[in-house]
Image (cartoon, helix red, strand yellow):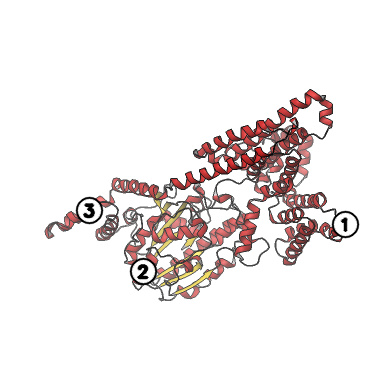
Amino acid sequence: MIVDAWRLSHLIDPDSTMIYLRNLVNSGQAVTFAANVQTPTVTMPRIKALTGGVVPSLISLVTNFFASENVEDNWITSAAAAGRRITFFGDDTWLRLFPKAFTEAEGVTSFFVNDYTEVDNNVTRRLDRVLTTDSWDLLILHYLGLDHIGHSLGGESPQIVKKLSEMDSIARRIINDVSARSPLLFIVVADHGMTAAGSHGGGSEAESRVPMLFFHSKTNVIKKGNLGELMSVEQIDLASTLPFFLGTNIPSGSIGLSLIPLLARYWKLSDSTIFSAAVQSHIHFSRFITDHALHRLASVEDSRRCEAAKAFVFHAKNPSTVERSRKVQRKIIQSEEEILHWPVFVGLALIFFTFLFSTVLQQSSTSTSPQDTVGATDHSAYLVFALYHISSYSTSLIEEEHDIWYYISSTLVLLRIFPNVMWRLGSLNFLQMVNSHSKVMDEFFLLCLHRLAISFTMSTRRRWSMRSGKSWLFGILISEKFTYCLDVLPPQIFPEFRFGISILDSISTDINISALCRSIPIITTALCTTYIVFRLQFKSTKYGWLVPITYFLPIIICCRLLTDDQCRWMTYIILIGCALGAIMSFSFGLMLYMSYLVRPETLPLLLICFEMGVLADRATFSPFLFAFLCQTVFFYPGLSSNISSIDIAIGYKGLSSYVPTFVLIQILINFYATPIAFALGYS
């Protein structure tokens, strides 16, 4: 049973609703491991890891959306070839990977993340018949609901608690129904975890540490479990463990270790079982390393072979042996994860020559006006370019890349301001300079907007998330994903007003802050879309008849936000309105569409980025600064180099079914919404 996006904390947290599985572990009837998952933590590569014991490459992240038949050795096809009857219900990715392996199968769409109820009900409804028959030897269930909740509602949604309870009851039902009539080996595992935001794909602990639970109905417990002290294993170990129970060979490419010796610490397993599993694993790994232990065991005299086998079993169960095996495995995994260096250097060379070519083009168009000269900035761009790429070799700087870009952009704009200020001070007095619509003021206001935009998601960054002492209202706004309301000020300031001024105390007790926070998305959307309509509407009389139509779009967008996709006709009206707006002005139509597409907490950032683009255009920023600012505004919504920062759920906005091309377009537009808005303003 695979529970998609089932992170470790979902089981081991004391307040977990998976009561039945927790009791099985605590009593020793079930053994749970904390399994490490290699990146990328997305479904298709993880299925290959679970079935083949291989470490997938990063390129498999792309093929996750276009899965095809798996030709690598795996225990699914081996079991099917050995005559095992395999039944599958769940994620249709399995059907694309193993199209000929199942005797009975039914898939559900894995990419329509807005559905987290029917997608699981369609799997569970088949259990009424399957659990009471002997038509299968191996039953695989892949539940997607938990993953879909994370994508659409977030990783801390109250729906997650209900879904975990549902998965717990399904596990209870399977164990009770099947074990009552035959021996049962029941395994519950996750393909990957999820972040607090509900995404996955990266290598954080929440994404890469998942439970792996084993239950056998006929075992004798010799040691009870402890959810607070789980043994750490690799997820790929499952591919080297299941073949022993299925009577097949370990997949040829598997680098997983058999978990039988670890299970023997909690269950009373016979020496012959442990010996057979250890020999199978040893034969498999003899392909990777040279060891003559098996040859020595085979050459032992018949009268001493039993004694030698017991010594072999004792050696296999020894903790030091397991630890040494883990060290070897980690080295193999590390070698599998190593990247080819030559493509990196080729990429850097291409970037360098592209930068050099654009520099030559820039130098060909020069300005003789002192105030239009950006020589200092252009010269600094060379140094910044070099320093940035040097920083790419530091993991810490990659994790905090947004801070580097924030600092670079601010510094380069200031380098433009100072020469202009000095030149103007020589020809004008200060008041004349301020009152004039100079480039200096445009650049100054751009810096102000830049600082404001940074504050929107400052609290979601790693350094702020580790701070304590945040105010009560600050916490409420975080839960509603509207942290930007208080991020402009440090969180420590608000409690001083809260407890120090009696007027604010009385106001705060009378106002329903929670209800006010819940209305912020509607208020934000209404204000921002109205601003877009009046700020960007086309003034040409040729399309004057279209202008009144656009006035209704903010109202419709807000109504759609209230109905939450229940009225499909509103989506069609919005898309038609955006298309009509694009007829008047491409920038106008695209900004309207993005105001409908992006989440409400990101919408103000679109306006800020657009106005920054307008100011950059008026200040005649060079292509260098334009490129740097485009990269900078990308990080404003809280995005990072982590794959999990990609919002998958946005791709399904307004859709009632999975349309791959349209989903991909919406994901990309949302992902690059702020740079697009900046470019529209700049143009």
Disc on res. 312:
3
Q: How many labels does the image show?
A: 3
Q: Closer to us: mark 2 or mark 3?
A: 2
Check contact, mark 1 vs mark 3: CB within 8 A: no
> Depth check: 155 or 29 in front?
155
Relative horizontal placement of residue 360, taking residue 316 as reference (left or right): right
Q: In which quarter of the image is residue 160?
A: bottom right
Amino acid carrying label 3: it is Phe
Residue 365 coordinates in the image, percent (x, y): 69, 39
Relative horizontal placement of residue 89, taking residue 619 as reference (left or right): left
Disc on res. 79:
2
Q: Distance between the residues labelled 1 and 3?
A: 90 Å
Residue 60 coordinates in the image, percent (x, y): 48, 57
Q: How far apart are marks 1 and 2 (CA)?
A: 72 Å
Q: Can residue 4 be seen at all in this image of the molecule?
A: no
Check the image and name the residue furthest to the front. Answer: 364
Residue 427 coordinates in the image, percent (x, y): 81, 24
Reading the image, the residue beneath label 1 is: 541
Q: In which quarter of the image is residue 115?
A: bottom right
Amino acid carrying label 2: it is Ala
Residue 259 coordinates in the image, percent (x, y): 35, 55
> Depth check: 7 or 39 in front?
39
